[in-house]
Image: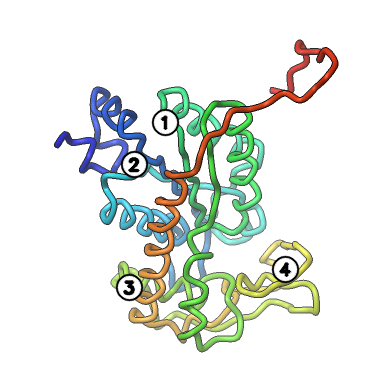
Amino acid sequence: MNRAEIEYRYNRLTWPEINDAIELQKLIILPTGSTEQHGHHLPLDVDVFLCESVCLEVGRRVPDKVLVLPPIAYGLNLHHIDFPGTIHIEPDVFIAFCLNITKSVAYHGFQKILIVNGHGSNAPLIDLVARKTVLETQSLCFATSYFWFLLKAFEAVRESAVIAHADEFETSLYLHLAGERVQMDKAVADNDRMGQFVSSDSTMNYFVRFNDYWGRWTRTGVHGDPTKATAEKGRIIFEAAVNGLVELVDELRAWPIEKRADLHTHPVQSQIRWT
């Protein structure tokens, strides 16, 4: 057994071992998050720390199937810029940066890539990165957010009405993973405006997408009730997220890369390029 079969961290391999990993056709996982305010009680690294922790645990459980890249710790965050510490990356810069990463691993020969998101505002951006990767390489790239895999488990234990930011869900996960960093004595509940069609609640089926400068409506940086958080709830939803992603890994590794067909019956203008 070579090291590529048991090492799940991309940057721990040597370049010859990367060749071995390509031979195994391991699924590449790229965690993405942000560096932004999360209330008075949570550190700035919530989104990237939680996402990377989930992805690394997936690697520990199926090391022969995946390679986890170092995470992207910054994202689209201008809406949080009124709070000190927040780092914002413009959408076109974020997309270009992520695309350079996915195209690099595709260039080396990895055929399957999964971008795992941990920051809500990055979701439309990683979707574009995945699509552009597929269209500009011979690899398949998929995009998801780790929290989609834990919502069902969370519904069974949640006590708060709103789930959005620095809330019961994120605080519980952080308490489970690194409780010593959480200042629960500073946790307070705070809620955004909610309408029939508009809200930033992450678990609700609202039909209108909207985000605002958070400095307009909150002085705490919280949307939800982190005082309801517990480490045990965090353990439950962490397991749900990891188990769901492990199942996804198997599905994506088995996903076929089919031959492309050109169905034109007349000559095309092949000199036209979109990239």
Q: Position of residue 213 (x, y in %)?
A: 70, 62
Q: Which badge, 1 or 3, comes first in the chain's sequence? A: 1
Q: Is residue 33 left or right of residue 10?
A: right
Amino acid type assigned to the residue bearing label 4 in the image: Arg
Q: CA distance from mark 3 to mark 2?
A: 24 Å
Quadrant (top left, top right, bottom left, bottom right) of the N terminus: top left
Quadrant (top left, top right, bottom left, bottom right) of the C terminus: top right
Q: Is residue 139 left or right of residue 59?
A: right
Give yes or no for contact between labels 1 and 2 (Cβ–Cβ under 8 Å). yes
Q: Which badge, 3 or 4, comes first in the chain's sequence? A: 3
Give the residue at x 42% y 31%: 110
Q: Nearer the viewer, mark 1 or mark 2?
A: 1
Amino acid type assigned to the residue bearing label 1 in the image: Phe
Q: Which badge, 4 or 1, comes first in the chain's sequence? A: 1
Q: Residues within 10 Å of mark 3 (few under 14, many from 20)?
A: some
Q: Residues within 10 Å of mark 1 (few under 14, many from 20)?
A: many
The residue that disc 3 covers is 176
